[in-house]
Structure formats: C-alpha cells, structure tokens
Image: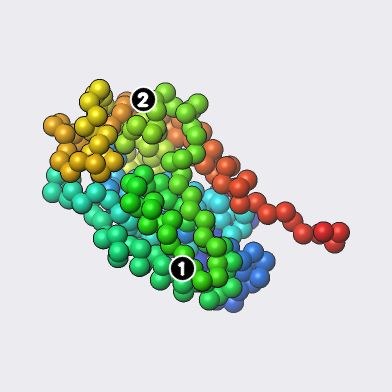
Amino acid sequence: MNRETGPERSLRLNHLSWPEVRRVLDRDPRLILAVGALDHHGPHLPLGANTTIAEHVALDLSIRLQLLVAPTFHYGLTKPDWAPYPGTGTLRRKTFHRAINELLASWDDHGIDEIVIITAQRHEPHIEALLTALTENAATKIVDLMTVDVTDIVEGNPEKERGGELETSLLLYLAPELVRMDEATDYLTDSASPRKYVDGRVTTPPPGFQGVVGRPSLAAAEKGAAAYGRYVDVLAEALARPVSGPDT
C-alpha cells in the first residue's frame, strides 16, 4: 500500500500542516522518531542500512496505529573509523545527545505526551545516548529493534553478526535495489577480535575485515519479510492503547 495515498497513510510531520498535526495530537498525543546511523556493513550493504530498517518500521507503525512520525534523524554514533571505510560518519556523543534532546524539547511544548524513538544501530554508546535523552514533560521510549527475538527465523545468531544474515535479509526485503549480493562475503572466525572491534573494545580492524561478521550468503528476502513483520507486530502490540468507549 502506498504510504502517502492509501486509505491509511503514514502521518509524516513534514507532510502535514500545523492544524492537521494539532488534530492528530488531540486524538493521540504520541510521536515516533526513527534514528539511524551512517555506518559500514560490508561491501554488499549500503552505509544507511540501519537507517533504512528503522525508518520503514517507523512509517509502518504510523500507518498501523495512526501516530505522527517525525522525519528520520539520519546520523548517530558509530565507531570513528572512517579511513578504512569511506563514507562512514559519526557525530560526537555530546553533539548527538544535544541534538536529540533539543528536538525532543521542541516537541515537548506541543502537547506530546510520549516520544517513541526507534533505532536499529547496535553500537552501545549510540543506545546509551538515546536512553539518556529526556524531556521535561513527555515520556521517552527507546526501541532497539535488534533486541527483538528473531532467532527462529534466521540460522545464525544475530547478536554475533554485523552485515550478516539478518541485516542482509532485511535489506533484501526492504530495499533490494541497494543490496549487492555479488559483493557479499562471509566472515567466520573463532577469534574474538572481530567482535571486540565491532563492539568498540579495540580500535583496529582485524586483518581481512570488510565490515561483515557472519554469513550474508544465508540471507533471503523471505527471512527479511518475516523478521520485519515481527518487528512491526511486536511494537504495534506494545504501543497499542485501548479504544475509549462510552462505558470506559
């Protein structure tokens, strides 16, 4: 369904007038914000892979629950390792935290009572910065999509992968035109070095590392569709509010 012209459409802030926004907030005073990152995920996936996943979930939740959704914040915190992986970019933690806080504060004055921040970026400092983003009045809910259990859908362990089976499957489903499977290479090792690098515990990439940990060769659009559907269903259930009626 077209997110802009179907009988149910995503309620994008940047596509609505302020009176339209006020009417939506009078019905449900919540706002969704997708926060992405510009980070390497191997030679086969785009730098904006995390952003693409989070943004699609935010838009589909807006459709499902008819909630306002803000324009996606495309930058976050990544490891500052630009030289080996051109295009990767990061904000400083202080800058990122301040930018998110100032955005939330600006919306806090408009009667919004909860801001739902959705991200798919695993980097711990990124998550920690979002968890400390607060407003004076509105509650904030941070949703890390990578914590949703999809281990029954994929063969590998998503928690130990980067640019592997899960993320490649999600992009094959959401944006197949951005995936270059002819460039995908599995990276399997018993060494803890790649994991320590991905987690930020060491600063130098291990030999032969191209941004991938895991087996993108196992990826399939069908797996991505199932995992993506799980994300949207879990969040929609968590965010659903009972409909008020004359006897409630």
Q: Nearer the viewer, mark 2 or mark 1?
A: 1
For residue 73, what is the image quadrant? Answer: bottom left
Q: Is residue 248 left or right of residue 134?
A: right
Binning the other alpha carbons within 10 Å of mark 2 as few (below 14), some (14 to 19) or many (20 upward) gives some
Q: Give the spatial CA distance, label 2 vs label 1.
A: 39 Å
**Amino acid type at mark 1:** Leu
Task: Indicate the position of residue 216 as horizontal and vertical percent values.
Answer: 32, 29
Q: Is residue 221 left or right of residue 10?
A: left
Residue 17 visible from this viewpoint: no
**Amino acid type at mark 2:** Leu
Task: Indicate the position of residue 201 as horizontal and vertical percent values.
Answer: 24, 41
Circle 2 is placed at which residue position? 218
Disc number for residue 104: 1
Q: Residue at x 58, y 42 (%)?
A: 233
Depth check: give the residue in front, 28 or 135.
Answer: 135
Against 25, residue 119 (above or below) is above
Binning the other alpha carbons within 10 Å of mark 1 as few (below 14), some (14 to 19) or many (20 upward) gives many
Q: Residue at x 52, y 42 (%)?
A: 231
Q: Is residue 164 left or right of residue 61?
A: left
Against 206, residue 237 (above or below) is below
Depth check: give the residue in front, 237 or 87.
Answer: 237
Which SS class for mark 1?
A: helix
Residue 46 visible from this viewpoint: yes
